[in-house]
Image (cartoon, rainbow, N blue to C red):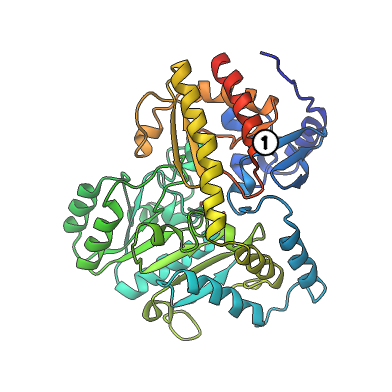
Amino acid sequence: MQDVLTNTKKSKELYKRACELIPGGVNSPVRSFKAVESEPLFITKAKGSYIWDADQNKYIDYVCSWGPLIHGHAHPEATEAIENALAKGISYGASHENEIELAEIIIKHMPSIERIRLVNSGTEAVMTALRLARAFTKRNKIIKFSGCYHGHSDSVLSNSGSGIATLGLPSCAGVTKNTASETITLPFNNFHNVEMTISKFPKEVAAVIVEPVVGNSGVIPPEANFLKSLRELTKKHNCLLIFDEVITGFRLALGGAQNIYKIIPDLTILGKIIGGGMPIGAVGGKKEIMELLAPLGPVYQAGTLSGNPISVACGIATLNMLNEETYTYLESISSLLCESIKEINEETNNKVQINRVGSMFTIFFTGTRVYDYASSKKSNTKIFTKFFQNMLQNGIYLAPSQFEANFISTSHKEEDIKKTLAVYKQVISAV
Ligand SMILES: *Cc1c(COP(=O)(O)O)cnc(C)c1O
């Protein structure tokens, strides 16, 4: 194989410096490239579908900042919105009109949301949603699914895919037994198990929280009726259904996964795309639940930088650029990539599964279907590592873990896809 061996001397030096100051050299674990037995690249510049590292190597980027950049890097309209907002001050710690505008845009597309509160991250939004669910139902237990990630707060860290799966940690140290014992973790796509569990603890489950399309153990779509059955069951037992749409919100459709699968959750968590790459998170849902939040109700929640004018301006610009054509384009370009990969796999007889929903996809190195966390874990991470490294050396920047989603943006063009396919064809026969 004609490796375009990238020179990564500067990244290596920077990583060394970072390791002396920052735990593991990174500010979020999956960035370390540990799962792919490599050292992290340091990025100096990004534009459209491309990123450049400290050694001037150029890559086609399928990470897209882990999902927020649905229009690609440094989109002129998002950048302009940030510049305009910047000229009017960085943070007020007080209300401003754009908070209302962002709320209006989100609520227009997600009718399940009657009231919404902005926070600074998906993690924060999940913390608030769980507190609200417990306050509203006066119950304590939470059901989550293995391989679903809901941020790094104590209650939701068991079997949470993604970073934890990547690093092979069974669970998280520092979480008390009491907290962990209030969380029940069940396999995704197995409704029977949920039904049994809720009937075992009839008046104790406050909420079921789910990524409607899993992104955090690689992409895993829900099976027919799984989400609908969860909706009916939670309603029957008076517990809340929480959709964590931090990835899927505005990624799969304007109304998120709830629109595609026609489900009305009680609470929805948003993040990533609604900030267009700036830090943000949101929790929204039924008025009677949301109005338990302070200052109206007894559930306390606050944030010095919540509703930050720069984040909100970037979020508004990002959402305003989305329309039906956006999703038609994303579907066609994503389908071109993934269907062509499938054809190459058939020709070369590879044991590879490709899971895709809209513009999110994962290439799993396993011969069997991936429908939950356990089946994703059957993937051969040794082969994935080799595959990842070879793709990277040839200018294709995929998520540095077998258990992550890759993202396609509107700035990915047919020529990027063609280049990616040419590299894939070479690499897949070499690994
Ligand atoms: C990224 C993510 C979160 C956490 O959001 P942060 O902004 O990183 O705290 C929560 N849930 C899902 C589904 C995510 O993908």
Q: Which residue is mark 1?
A: 415
Are there few (<14), some (14-19), or many (20+) residues within 10 Å of tag 1? Answer: few
Q: Mark 1: which secondary structure?
A: helix
What residue appears at the point 38 percent right and 38 percent down from the top-left corner?
373
- Of 314 and 95, nearer the camera is 314
Does 366 appear above or below 223?
A: above
Q: Is residue 80 visible?
A: yes
- Of 203 and 191, nearer the camera is 191
Does 198 appear above or below 292?
A: above
Residue 126 in picture, x, y percent from top left: 47, 62
Residue 337 in picture, x, y percent from top left: 54, 35
Residue 48 in picture, x, y percent from top left: 72, 47
Query: Residue 356, located in which quarter of the rendered image?
Result: top left
Q: Is residue 167 visible?
A: no
Does 5 appear above or below 142?
A: above
Query: Residue 9, located in which quarter of the rendered image?
Result: top right
What residue appears at the point 46 percent right and 79 percent down from the top-left corner?
293
What residue appears at the point 82 percent right and 34 percent down from the top-left corner?
56
- Of 250 and 133, nearer the camera is 250
